[in-house]
Amino acid sequence: RLESLDWLRASHARELVRSFPVDMLLPAEPAGCGGEPLSASAPLEGGEAVARADAAEGPRPDALGSLLVLRCLLRHGRCDAPRWISKGAAGLLVVGLSAASPSARSLAYEAVAALMAVLRNGPSFRERPHVVRLLRSLQDAITKPNLRVPSLWSVFVAHGLAILAQPHHPQYKALNNYILTRAFFDLSDVPMFFHCFHSGSSTPRDDRLWMLALLSHGLRAEEDARLCGGRHVLELLLGFSDSSLADPPARRACLAVLLRASGTADGASALLSKHGILAWLRMQLCASPLSSPLLELVALLAALVRSPPFASLAAATHAEAGRALCDAIAAARAV
């Protein structure tokens, strides 16, 4: 019987979770379903971090291929649940629930259901009650068949599975408290945002950095940007990055989230029209010395200018973007 996960490295699974191509399509699906069709000559994107990885680690599986193999192992093989969690296979299945493709999503749902059956009926292990509670909280939040789960939530659950396998993890207690105080997850909210960002723990900086990393990995689609808008996440990040609480790693993490948001139409529109992002960028670029990395600031400006909402904005906004570009050039010359 099939049982080996040797083909999947934990580091590869983590990268696939971070850069899962949610807009992928299966070959038979039309492009209107939510992304570009797959072809044998155009493998799925795995993110820049995957492309830059050390070739000595061996070939890296793509997202769809991994889902197919994992589903096959669950259907015809023997599943060692603790190993699936520690290797990241379980988290990869959960992230598949955010795929735009109905067929890919259905594939992920089938695999997650099989994994939950293994957890219910298979051998017990120390972390099983916590893992089952986490997956059940997500399951009970799904209100219709083949629902597309927001990426913020699927990535949160995938990270949560990895944390529950490490009782020494700094977020282990906070995550368990969050799960136990809810009958099910509210998929219209941003998971654990206020618990971490306004943390009263003894390690508030680490809590904020963990949440910022979660946001930068999970903010992939329009629905994720809308969730952030409902909780005023982007405004809070703009204010936080200018505060004395934000050290250089925190500012870089904030910029990573803002860059992710600018890649969605809703996120870019909110940043440009509501949050004064261009004026904020000019303030960052004119600071002496620069409080944020110049390349990240320029990348954010370029992403906003390329975004579809930018073309429909007033001439004054275009002029502000031009002034921000001039400030970026001046800052580059001063470096």
Image (cartoon, rainbow, N blue to C red):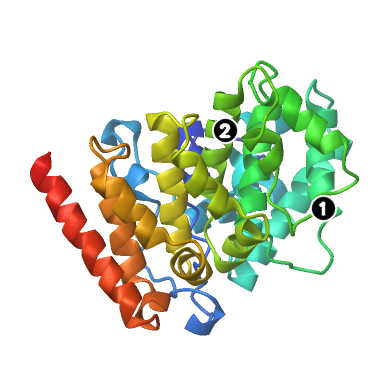
- Upstream in the sequence, badge 2 or badge 1? 1
The residue singled out by tag 2 in the image is 208
Q: Residue at x 39, y 77 (%)?
A: 308
The spot of residue 58 in percent (x, y) is: 34, 36
On residue 233, which mark appears?
Answer: none
Say which amino acid is labelled 1: Gln
Q: Nearer the viewer, residue 14 or 201?
A: 201
> Quadrant of the rendered structure where residue 109 is?
bottom right
**Image height of 319 relative to 11, above or below:** below
Whether residue 107 is visible here, answered yes or no, is yes
Q: Nearer the viewer, residue 43 or 277?
A: 277
In the picture, measured across the screen, residue 193 lies left or right of residue 59, that is: right
Q: Residue at x 39, y 39 (%)?
A: 252
In the picture, measured across the screen, residue 46 lies left or right of residue 68, that is: left
Whether residue 41 is visible here, answered yes or no, is no
Q: Secondary structure at mark 2?
A: helix
On residue 139, which mark appears?
Answer: 1
Q: Residue at x 54, y 64 (%)?
A: 221
**Image height of 323 relative to 294, above or below:** below
The spot of residue 90 in percent (x, y) is: 65, 41
Q: Nearer the viewer, residue 54 or 271?
A: 271
